[in-house]
Image (cartoon, rainbow, N blue to C red):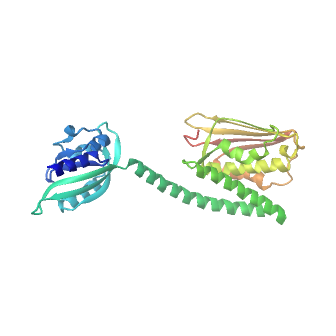
């Protein structure tokens, strides 16, 4: 008897949920004869609420029948079974349970009971599902990134630059792409904020309060963050070489706002340079201009307006957003 009391104390102290059922598999299945306190903590059912009932009370509309069929086949063969399924607590909330069901045999080999050790693995399963999703997203993004690098290389090569200029321009664009991907990778949702992309490009040049940024937090998924990050890099490079940031007295004002409402959200952002060198229309379409007018529009569905005002470059972009990008 002392051994039985010790065993019962151990079962009641364990963190694993334990059910002991009758051996009968016919009809509605075995009946619960014992449930330990960990089972109550996991399911919300007190022991007296489940004793005499079948474990089917834990099943629901989303419980996978295929798993239950495999379990039944194993038990009918007198074998132990390990698996996972979606169960339901007393309050109706769902959880993922991992079972290990083992037969208890009499001396003559007959099964007298089933002992089921159960564990709530909802968080582990959610983490594993996120990992799978992130691997798929990473695979997709690597393919897109390689295509983007090739497109940037080809476009930079066609710009007619000297080797030194080509190296500087191409290296800068790849470094910008790397910064954007770093922001995306650091975010659990694999996204980047517009403000984060803007500051990644411009914070190193924010001296004497020449830069002003104004706008709400807007989160861009990776398929939008990459082209927007490249566009901001091209605008920054142009401002440093030919625009407002090339002049000690030059200023840059970037504003953005949400438009369109929840049903059809959009982002409007304006890049306004002031007090820089005189601005003239370009004699040819460089990569940056082509990126704004063609690539950004093609990849994000944006409408782009460029104005070479006498006071400085003006760029206005309207781009649609997916739901939830706020």
Could you say where residue 193 lies in the image, as x and y percent from the top left?
Answer: 63, 43
Q: As rendered, which of 24 and 39 lies closer to the eye?
A: 39
- The residue sitting at the right extreme is 278
Toward which corner of the image does residue 255 lie, by quadrant?
top right
| Residue 37: % across, % down | 27, 42
44 versus 177 height, above or below = above
Q: Specify the quadrant that holds the C terminus.
A: top right
Observer-nearest residue: 308 or 184?
184
Residue with the most extreme top position: 261
**As drawn, 211 above or below 154:** above
The residue located at (58%, 33%) in the rendering is 261
Q: Against 77, is 96 above or below?
A: above
| Residue shown at the point (12%, 59%) measured from the top left | 106
Q: Residue furthest front?
A: 2
Seen in the image, is 65 located left or right of residue 33? Answer: right
Does residue 323 appear left or right of residue 56 in this picture?
A: right
Residue at image position (73%, 63%) is 154
Q: Nearer the viewer, residue 37 or 66?
A: 37
Q: Is residue 220 visible?
A: yes
Looking at the image, residue 260 sits to the left or right of residue 230; the answer is left
Rendered residue at 77%/64% (across/down): 157
Residue 160 is left or right of residue 147, and the answer is right
Give the image location of residue 110, x and y in percent: 11, 60
- Look at the image and tell me whether residue 202 can be seen: no
Q: Residue 250: x, y in percent?
A: 86, 40
């Amino acid at each position: 008897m002392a051994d039985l009391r010790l065993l019962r104390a151990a079962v009641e102290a364990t963190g694993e949920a334990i059910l002991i059922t009758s051996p009968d598999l016919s009809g509605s299945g075995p009946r619960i004869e014992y449930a330990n306190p960990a089972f109550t903590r996991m399911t919300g059912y007190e022991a007296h609420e489940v004793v005499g009932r079948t474990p089917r009370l834990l099943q629901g509309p989303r419980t996978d029948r295929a798993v239950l069929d495999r379990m039944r086949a194993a038990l009918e063969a007198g074998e132990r079974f390990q698996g996972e399924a979606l169960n339901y607590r007393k309050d109706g909330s769902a959880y993922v349970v991992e079972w290990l069901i083992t037969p208890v045999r009499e001396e003559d080999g007959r099964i007298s009971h089933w002992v089921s050790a159960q564990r709530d693995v909802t968080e582990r399963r959610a983490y594993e599902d996120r990992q799978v999703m992130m691997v798929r997203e990473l695979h997709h993004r690597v393919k897109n990134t390689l295509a983007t690098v090739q497109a940037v290389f080809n476009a930079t090569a066609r710009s007619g630059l000297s080797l030194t200029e080509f190296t500087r321009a191409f290296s800068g664009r790849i470094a910008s792409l790397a910064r954007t991907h770093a922001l995306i990778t650091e975010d659990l949702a694999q996204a980047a904020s517009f403000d984060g992309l803007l500051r990644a490009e411009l914070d190193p040049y924010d001296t004497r309060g020449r830069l002003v940024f104004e706008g709400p937090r807007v989160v861009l998924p990776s398929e939008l963050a990459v082209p927007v990050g490249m566009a901001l890099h091209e605008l920054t490079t142009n401002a440093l070489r030919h625009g407002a940031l090339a002049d000690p007295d030059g200023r840059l004002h970037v504003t953005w706002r949400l438009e369109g409402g929840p049903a059809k959200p959009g982002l409007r952002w304006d890049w306004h340079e002031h007090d820089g060198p005189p601005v003239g229309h370009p004699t040819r379409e460089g990569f940056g201009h082509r990126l704004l007018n063609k690539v950004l529009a093609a990849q994000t569905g944006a409408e782009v307006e460029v104005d070479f005002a006498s006071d400085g470059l003006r760029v206005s972009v309207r781009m649609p957003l997916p739901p939830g990008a706020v």
